[in-house]
Image: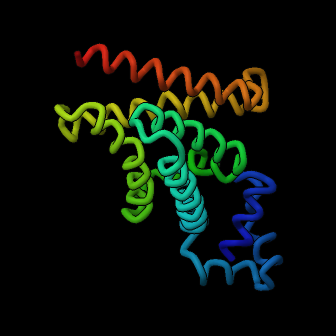
Amino acid sequence: MIRAAERMIAERGLAGLKTRDLAREIGCANGAVYNLVADVDELVLCIGSRTLLRLDEALSAAVRAGNPSPQETLVRIAIAYCDFAAENLELWRALFEHRIEPDKEVPDWFVDDQLKLFRHIHAPLAALFPKRGTEELGITARSLFSAVHGMVALGLEQRLVAVPLPALRKEIALLVRAMLDGLIARAS
């Protein structure tokens, strides 16, 4: 069921996930979907967890590839994030578009899946800034992620602000290097 729902989102976007269509595809009654998951939120979070796992694999590969310097590692991570988003656009978008009902909490396991990814950014930052504490490094990691994520989200937008992928990749590399150069200069 999760793989079928994942295909639906990949093909049609989050709004294209319909339990009636899903039930038909997996060969069960519409109500039987809710025997397998509590609600659509749980289903989307399960798909999101699978997406985050694949993103983690892509970021891990970027960490291992090429020049081991912390700066270049962070550039590779940022470009790998961009490439992953471009290659898995609707599943990546679903990570950020889905809203849990206001009276429900996001499960700890899903929060853990998200936070685990920050280790890819945190480790090179810790190597660059050994005097910074964990909390300060965490804020810098989230800030760097936010800058890259914003560029990716707007750059891949299929409307007015779309940027061709090769140009977006170059601009992301420039941004990451500039941010790191500024942080290094400030630390000196």
Residue 181: x and y, percent?
39, 18
Asked if 174 appears above or below 156 in the picture, the reply is: above
Task: Give residue 10's quadrant in the image.
Answer: bottom right
Place residue 69 in its image quadrant. Answer: top left
Q: Residue at 37% across / 49% down in the picture?
A: 119
**Residue located 53% across and 48% down the image:** 65
In the rendered structure, the answer to whether residue 81 lies left or right of residue 108 reads right
- Compared across the picture, whether 93 is left or right of 67 comes to right
Q: Is residue 9 above or below residue 170?
A: below
The quarter of the picture where residue 79 lies is: top right
* Quadrant of the image containing the C terminus: top left
- In the rendered structure, the answer to whether residue 119 lies left or right of residue 2 reads left
Q: Position of residue 142 (x, y in %)?
A: 39, 36
Task: Residue lying at the far front in this picture: please name it.
Answer: 67
Q: Residue at x 80, y 56 (%)?
A: 11
Work out whether residue 45 or residue 71 is closer to the camera in this orientation and state it: 71
How many numbered dots are placed on residues in this image? 0
Between residues 101 and 96, which one lies in front from this camera angle? Answer: 96
Q: Is residue 79 above or below residue 92?
A: above
The residue at 62%/39% (across/down) is 82
Q: How is the image coloured?
A: rainbow
Q: Position of residue 97 (x, y in %)?
A: 60, 45
Screen quadrant of the N terminus: bottom right
